Amino acid sequence: MSEKTLSITSLRSGGLITNYHCSSACRHCLYRCSPRWPKEYVSPETTQENLRTVRALGCHSIHVGGGEPLLNPSCVASVLEIAGEERVSVEYVETNSSWYRTHDDACAILALLADRGLSTLLVSMSPFHNEHIPFYKVRGVIEACYVTGVSVFPWIAAFIPDIGVFDETTTHALEEYQEYFGKHYLENLSRRYWISPGGRALETFAKSFQEKSLSKLRGESDGCMELADVNHFHIDLYGNYVPGLCSGLSVKREDLGTVLGQHEYPIISRLYSQGIGGFVSHAEKKHGFRALRTTYASKCALCYEIRRFLLIDKGITSKELQPVGHYLYG
Ligand code: SF4
Ligand code: SF4
C-alpha cells in the first residue's frame, strides 16, 4: 500500500508573521515568542514573495501578527503597502500594546498605518498578556484607535472584568489571578481562551489535559491530518510556511504546491502518513531517542520533545525544524 503524501495546494485563511521577537513572553504563546528572539523583521522582498505565493494558492486576505509587529511600525507600514500592491487585503494587525508610550505618540503611529491601509487592530487582552503588559497601555491603544478611525478587534473582551480587578498601571502574574479567583483559574483559562496545544501552552497546560501513556501514543498510527489544515496557516519572515498549527515545523515557501516527499521532508511526511506512533518509533530506532516521560498531555507534547531532541541533542539541522529559535529561545 502506498503511503499518504502531503501537498499544500491551496490556502484558505492565514497570517504573515513579521517577527518572532516580542516584548511579552506569554505562557500560552504558540510560537514561543519572547524578548530573547533576535530583533529580525520581515523584509519587503520576503513580504512580496510570501504574499504572491499565498495569493497564487487562492488566499486573498491575511492578518499580520508576530511576535509584536508594532515594535517596528515602519515594517508594518511596508507590509501594508506591499499587500495593497499585491492585491492581498489585510484583515487586521495584531498587537499586545506594549509599544504604547503616550496618547499623541500612539495616535501618530496609528494614523501613519491607517494611511497605509490599516483598517483593524486586533488588541490582545488577557491574563497571559497582563503578566507582561500593564492594562493602561491596552486602554491607551484602544483610545488611539478611536481617535484615528482604526477599528478595534478586542481579543478577548470577556477578560476585561478579570483584568479590571487589579491595578492597571502595572503587570500581574497569573498566580495573582489564581490567588484572587481561585486555584482552578489557570486550568479554566484553557476553556475561556482559544488555546492551541503547541508552543509554551504545552508546558503551561500540561496538567490540564488527560495524560496519555507513551505506549498508547506509540500505537497511534493515524496520520496527523492537522498538518494539512489550511484554515489558519502562517508564513513567516524567513519564508517558512507553518503547516496547520504545528509550530516549530516548517515547509519552505518554494515547496508549497509540490508533494512533500520522504526524502525532502522526512519528519513531516512521516507524521502525516504514520502519525506520532511512526515518528516516535523512527526516532527511537534511527536516532536513539528515549522518551523523558511515561505519560504525555498530548501527542503534540511528545512530538515537540522528539523534535527538540533531534535539533538540540543530536544537532540535526533541517529545513523542517524551523525556525530554530522556536527551540532555542522558547
Ligand atoms: S502571544 Fe502574542 S504577545 Fe504573547 S508572547 Fe506570543 S506573540 Fe507575544
Ligand atoms: S503531533 Fe506533531 S505533527 Fe501531529 S498535530 Fe501535533 S504537533 Fe502537529
Image (cartoon, rainbow, N blue to C red):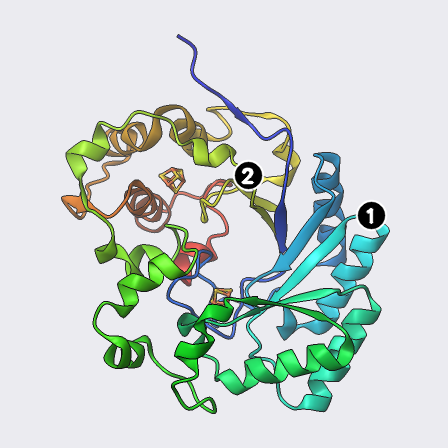
Label 2 residue near ligand 2, CB within 8 Å: no
* Crowd rating for badge 2 (residues with CA inside 10 Å; few <14, some 14–19, many 20+): many
Residue 205, picture quadrant: bottom left
Give the image quadrant in which the ligand numbered 2 is located: top left
> Which amino acid is tagged 1?
Arg
Q: Residue farthest to the top?
A: 1
| Residue located at (82% from left, 48% from top) | 86
Give residue 19's position: percent from left, percent from top.
59, 62
Q: Is residue 77 left or right of residue 126?
A: right
| Residue located at (40% from left, 73% from top) | 127
Q: Is residue 43 left or right of residue 154?
A: right
Give residue 102's position: percent from left, percent from top.
65, 91
Front: mark 1 or 2: 1
Where is 55 relative to 90, above or below? Answer: above
Closer-to-camera residue (264/141):
141
Q: Which residue is mark 1?
A: 87
Where is 251 relative to 146, above or below? Answer: above
Where is 81 relative to 173, above or below? Answer: above
> Which amino acid is tagged 2?
Val
Closer-to-camera residue (18/210):
210
Closer-to-camera residue (324/152):
152
| Residue located at (34% from left, 29% from top) | 275
Q: Which mark is residue 251?
A: 2
* Crowd rating for badge 1 (residues with CA inside 10 Å; few <14, some 14–19, many 20+): some
Secondary structure of the residue carrying tag 1 is loop
Residue 271, picture quadrant: top left
Q: Which mark is residue 231?
A: none
Q: CA distance from mark 1 to mark 2?
A: 24 Å
Secondary structure of the residue carrying tag 2 is strand
Q: Quadrant of the C terminus?
A: bottom left
Give residue 84's position: percent from left, percent from top.
83, 54
Residue 258 appears in the figure: yes
